[in-house]
Image: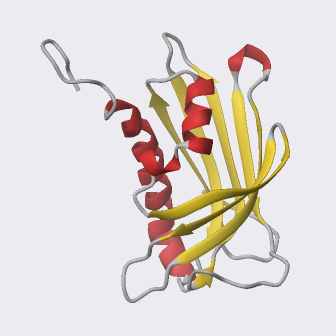
């Protein structure tokens, strides 16, 4: 975790996990198959495609009662043509025109960066760097809990590939 000097008292968290998928497949899972790994996702959709590697994405996450659901509007850009088979995805929140909310509160993704590096035999190392303001949480909560949420997300992404392995004789999970 790192403090960033932009006036927001939220730490930057970094988590890493090895995943049984090549970087391009992992990038597709993060970008296009969020329902397979995000258990809090209520809905998500691409609002506008800006170019082949950039879009505007809106999504809503469920919160535990009595907290309201959180809505995010993010600009996402990704690269799948980096040297040595590396892929990357960066996202940041935008303030929508009109400011109308469909969900209870607007969350702010201050920064989200995924680095997906090949690490042999069709595997990848997923590194996620994240700062987000989920609204309604204290700085103490972020210091104690947000890093665990980031790690849990990375593990759910990793495990989403294990869930697709058919069970049968000799299959080990």
Of 14 and 173, nearer the camera is: 173
Tell me if I can see residue 127 in this picture: yes
Q: On the picture, is 58 further left or further right than 172?
A: right
At 67% from the left and 83% from the top, the residue drawn is 101
What is the residue that sits farthest to the bottom in this orientation? 66
Q: On the picture, is 47 further left or further right than 160?
A: right
157 lies above or below 6: above
Name the quadrant containing residue 83.
top right
The total number of labels drawn is: 0
Quadrant in the picture for the C terminus: top left
101 lies above or below 88: below
Quadrant in the picture for the N terminus: bottom right
At 70% from the left and 18% from the top, the residue drawn is 85
**Coordinates of residue 21 in the picture (x, y in percent):** 49, 23
**Coordinates of residue 150 in the picture (x, y in percent):** 50, 55
At 53% from the left and 83% from the top, the residue drawn is 137
At 15% from the left and 12% from the top, the residue drawn is 170
**Coordinates of residue 50 in the picture (x, y in percent):** 86, 49
**Coordinates of residue 48 in the picture (x, y in percent):** 79, 55
162 lies above or below 132: above
Tell me if I can see residue 37 in this picture: no
Q: In the rendered view, how is the structure colored?
A: secondary structure
Q: On the picture, is 3 further left or further right than 44?
A: right
Of 151 and 41, nearer the camera is: 41
């Amino acid at each position: 975790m790192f403090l960033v000097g932009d006036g927001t008292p939220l730490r930057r968290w970094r988590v890493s996990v090895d995943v049984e998928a090549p970087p391009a497949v992992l990038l597709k899972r993060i970008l296009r198959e969020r329902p397979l790994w995000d258990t809090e996702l209520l809905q998500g959709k691409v609002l506008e495609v800006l170019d082949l590697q950039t879009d505007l994405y809106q999504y809503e996450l469920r919160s535990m009662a009595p907290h309201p659901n959180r809505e995010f509007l993010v600009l996402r850009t990704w690269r799948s043509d980096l040297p040595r088979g590396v892929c990357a995805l960066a996202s940041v929140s935008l303030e929508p025109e009109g400011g109308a909310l469909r969900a209870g509160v607007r969350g702010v993704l201050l920064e989200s960066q995924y680095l997906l590096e090949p690490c042999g035999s069709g595997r990848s190392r997923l590194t996620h760097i994240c700062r987000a303001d989920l609204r309604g949480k204290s700085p103490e909560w972020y210091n104690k809990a947000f890093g665990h949420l980031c790690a849990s997300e990375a593990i759910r992404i990793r495990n989403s590939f294990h869930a697709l392995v058919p069970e049968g004789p000799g299959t080990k999970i």
